[in-house]
Image: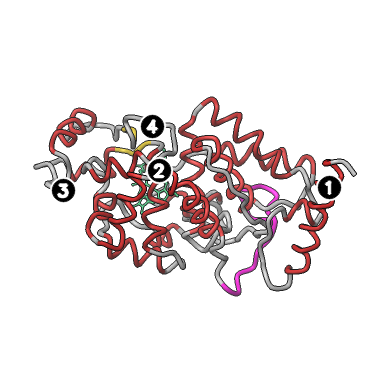
Amino acid sequence: MGAKGTFKIQIFLSCILLFGTMATKSLEIGYYRCTNTCPQAEEIVKGIVYKYVLQNPGLGAGLIRMFFHDCFVRGCDASILLDKSSHNPNPEKLAVPNNHSLRGFEVIDEAKSAVEHVCPGVVSCADIIAFAARDATYFLGKISYEIPSGRLDGRISIADEVKALPSPFHNLTVVKALFAAQGLSADDVVILSGAHSIGRSHCSSFRRRLYPVIDPTMDQKFGYFLRTKCPENAPVDGVVLQDFVTPSKLDTRYYRNVAELKGLFFSDWSLLTSSETVNLVHDFRTTPQHFETKFAESMVKMGNILMLPGTKGEIRKSCRAVNY
Ligand code: HEM
């Protein structure tokens, strides 16, 4: 038998194993392939994510952040995607941390239409976000992993619940507590914060560290540089890159920035305030190879945050609205 035949048998066996554990696990790697409900789903999403991220790497950063913001509020249920409606008059996407800040919604819309075209009513928007974040991670960081799927979409989205997310002004104790509430550890805080090596930030997320005096926890020269990008009374909220050296590469530069007091947020600096986190910052800074596997593992872990118990899920027809 040729190598191709062996490969097919391996896939077949892995699917049998997955079915065997279905009763105990709610998410499975290759769910749409193994259930034969939409074998092409992951490839279709990948093609669309690549198309957009190639044009604008910032959208890849947006998709990774979208996954985080989705999973921390009511679990990974695509509640972040719901538009304002009579059903959800004040949805998550309108809350301060998301409004005019979160990006990549158009990528998810196009991926959903493409998947619906081939296999209508089968693939959840929550899984599409998880696939898109995984694909963006590969595209920007060459970090590859498989993400279990089979999630359902929620029907509820409430702006006020976004307080489950950490703020850039929180100290380590608060950030750790918010992660712990989701079943994530202090290590996960350090590992996932590594995503701040890509993308952008609005000045409003750190301006109070610049005026009236530059925060002593920030490198002073860096602070003066940021002041040029974010003037005190600027009429519009400007944006700066999170990492000025390799802004579109998901790498370990973030840890170097943090160690040199050149992280944008107080929460970034706070990783240096406990031995529980500072050691990992230095480990990733000096041994970048350690970061890749850990980042992949923590993304999968974050993707396992489930919908609230007793919540009813569905496969939405449009990612922006619940089914009626
Ligand atoms: C540890 C607590 C965290 C805090 C306080 C935090 C806060 C923030 C803030 C304030 C911004 C800038 C938003 C803006 O001004 O537009 C940002 C950007 C970003 N965050 Fe975080 N974040 C945290 C953890 C994470 C995690 C866990 C991830 C994903 C694994 C992540 C991924 C990103 C990415 C990729 C961006 C850039 C987004 C873009 O360019 O559109 N962050 N974060």
User: Measured along the vertical axis of the image, is residue 287 above or below residue 169?
Assistant: above
User: Is the magenta region chiefly helix, strand or loop?
Assistant: loop
Q: Secondary structure at mark 1?
A: helix
Percent across and percent down for residue 10 are 79, 52
* Structural distance between the alpha carbons of marks 2 and 3: 25 Å
Residue tagged 2: 288
Q: Residue furthest right?
A: 1
Residue 286 image position (x, y, % from top left): 33, 44
Q: Secondary structure at mark 4?
A: loop
Label 2 near ligand 1 (CB < 8 Å): no
Q: Between disc 3 and disc 1, whose residue precedes? A: 1
Image position of 199 (left or right of 129): left
- Left/right placement of residue 2 relative to residue 98 reads right
Residue at 53%, 25% in the rendered image: 55
Q: Please, what secondary structure does the residue beneath circle 3 have? A: loop
Q: Which residues are magenta?
A: 309-324
Are circles 4 and 1 on residues that touch, CB within 8 Å? no
Location of mark 1 (residue): 6
